[in-house]
Amino acid sequence: MSEKEANWKYADDYVVEPESIARAREHALELGVEAVSPAVGSQLAVLAAALRASSIVEVGTGTGVSGLWLLTGAPNATLTSIDSEPDHQAAARSAFAEAGIGMSRIRLISGRANEVLPRMNEESYDLVLVDADPRSVIEYVEHGLRLVRRGGLVLVANALWHGDVANPVRRDAVSTAFRTLLEEIGQSKAVLSTLSPAGGGLLQLIRL
């Protein structure tokens, strides 16, 4: 194991997940859903808390792991979460209920994000998390930046895509999409950005 890999593993192991999130992660494994790592989850909580987020959009519900982490940091926020897999959202609904989060604070939308996002109101949210079909990541980020208020955050999970983005030899559609996104974001004057390498990478954008 390289020094970097050891550091990333230590960062994940450092996080003690609440029981509700640990169970949601177990359900993700059972359903074959790739949930955010504990290190990324804890970053989501810290960022949501620092932003004092009250309105959050999540592109990719999964089994509720990332949503639970976001609401850990923003316990009074409302969460709108989009996913095309009803089984995943059913598991997430159970996870939210088990964590004691009232469904009045959760809006689960079953559908394709590229059809749902265009109908959502501009500049109406504090934070948008993108953790869905990586082939559409550029489109989702564009929508995210439209939806968040000025000073709001757009977060992109798995932005390094299992190490493939940093490897110029990798030319598949997903690696190329993330690489293109990172290059465009790096040149944009409309956002302030940073990229954390933990847990597959977390791209963080503040709309200026």
Image (cartoon, rainbow, N blue to C red):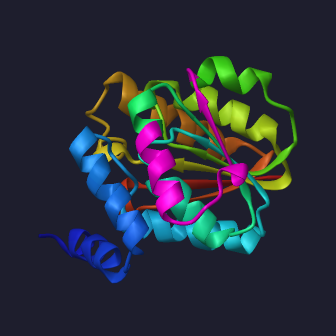
Rendered image quadrant of residue 18: bottom left
Front in this rendered view, residue 24 or 1: 24
Q: Residue furthest left?
A: 1
Magenta highlight range:
90-112
Residue 107 in magenta stretch? yes
Residue 202 visible somewhere in the drawing: no
Residue 75, how many percent across, how many down?
68, 69
Residue 6, how many percent across, how many down?
21, 75
Q: Residue furthest top?
A: 115
Residue under the point 41% across and 46% down = 63
The answer to whether 103 is drawn above or below residue 172 in the figure is: below
Left or right, 102 with respect to 12, comes to: right
Q: Quadrant of the N terminus?
A: bottom left
Front in this rendered view, residue 192 or 96: 96
Residue 208, how many percent across, how many down?
85, 52
The answer to whether 65 is drawn above or below residue 132 in the figure is: below
Q: How many marks?
A: 0
The answer to whether 90 is drawn above or below residue 71 in the figure is: above
Front in this rendered view, residue 112 or 7: 112
Residue 185 visible somewhere in the drawing: yes
Residue 2, how many percent across, how many down?
16, 70
Left or right, 34 with respect to 192, comes to: left
Front in this rendered view, residue 74 or 194: 74
Residue 65 in magenta stretch? no
Residue under the point 69% across and 68% down = 74
Residue under the point 65% across and 17% down = 115
Rendered image quadrant of residue 110: top right
